[in-house]
Amino acid sequence: NSVTNMQFCFSGCTGLTEAPAIPNSVTDMLACFSGCTSLIQAPFIPDSVTNMGLCFSDCTSLTAAPVLPCSVTNIWGCFINCIGLTKAPAIPESVTNMRSCFFGCTSLTETPSIPELVTDLQFCFSGCTGLTEAPVIPNSVTNMEDCFKNCASLTKVPSLPKGIEYISNCFSGCKNLTG
């Protein structure tokens, strides 16, 4: 129960179908289950966790995201290529980094609300071919490079933040945009 760092703990365990309980003391789950292609259900994530970068990347059998703890700030690449994921989890207000969070989640049809503290959405929804609608983008966001790249089903461009600095290729490959 004193473990705080679970970085890469089960990374690449392709036969893992069920995750163990995560101790309440854990704060860092960087790439903890990355590449666990047989993982069907995510574990309960304790409130102590602040870093979930790449945590479930390439978990292609995962169909439901876990509830994200209110303390988490980094979900960079958390669900990259989770092709079975249809709905994004609610994103806590504490999150500041969502870079590549849902990259390649081809079955994702519903986006989460983006918290006001988020500044980086680079590649966030890139390749989410099932998305038809973009979320509201808060004015805090400064980087949207490749954010919706290849979201072929996206039909409308969201209102863009006033302070956006990087936006190249944001809507590249979005062939169904009408407005």
Image (tube, helix red, strand yellow):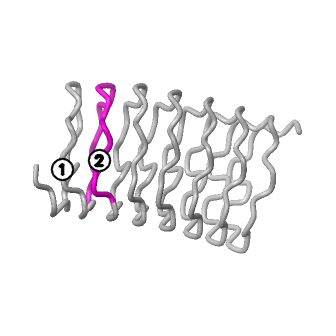
Alpha carbon separation for disc pair 1 and 2? 7 Å
Residue type, numbered disc 1: Lys
Q: Tell me the number on the disc at residue 156.
A: 1
Magenta range is 131-150
Q: Tell me the number on the disc at residue 35.
A: none
- Between residue 134 and residue 25, name the one nearer to us: 134
On whether residue 26 falls in the magenta region, the answer is: no
On whether residue 142 falls in the magenta region, the answer is: yes
Instruction: Say whether residue 9 is left or right of residue 146.
Output: right
Vertical order, 3 against 33 (above or below):
above
Vertical order, 79 against 75 (above or below):
below
* Spot occupied by residue 109 in the image (x, y as percentages of width and height): 38, 58
* Spot occupied by residue 176 in the image (x, y as percentages of width and height): 16, 62
- As helix, strand or loop, the secondary structure at mark 2 comes to loop
Mark 1 touching mark 2, by CB under 8 A?
A: yes
Instruction: Say whether residue 109 is left or right of residue 134.
Output: right
- Between residue 37 and residue 111, name the one nearer to us: 111
Vertical order, 94 against 125 (above or below):
above
- As helix, strand or loop, the secondary structure at mark 1 comes to loop
Query: For residue 145, which quarter of the picture?
Result: top left
Q: Tell me the number on the disc at residue 134.
A: 2
* Spot occupied by residue 151 in the image (x, y as percentages of width and height): 27, 60
Residue type, numbered disc 2: Ala
Instruction: Say which quadrant the N terminus sits in.
Output: top right
* Spot occupied by residue 55 in the image (x, y as percentages of width and height): 60, 51
Secondary structure, magenta segment, majority class: loop
Name the residue located 50 percent from the left edge and 38 percent from the top edge: 91
Instruction: Say whether residue 142 is left or right of residue 79.
Output: left
Q: Residue lying at the far left in this picture: please name it.
A: 178
- Between residue 150 and residue 87, name the one nearer to us: 87
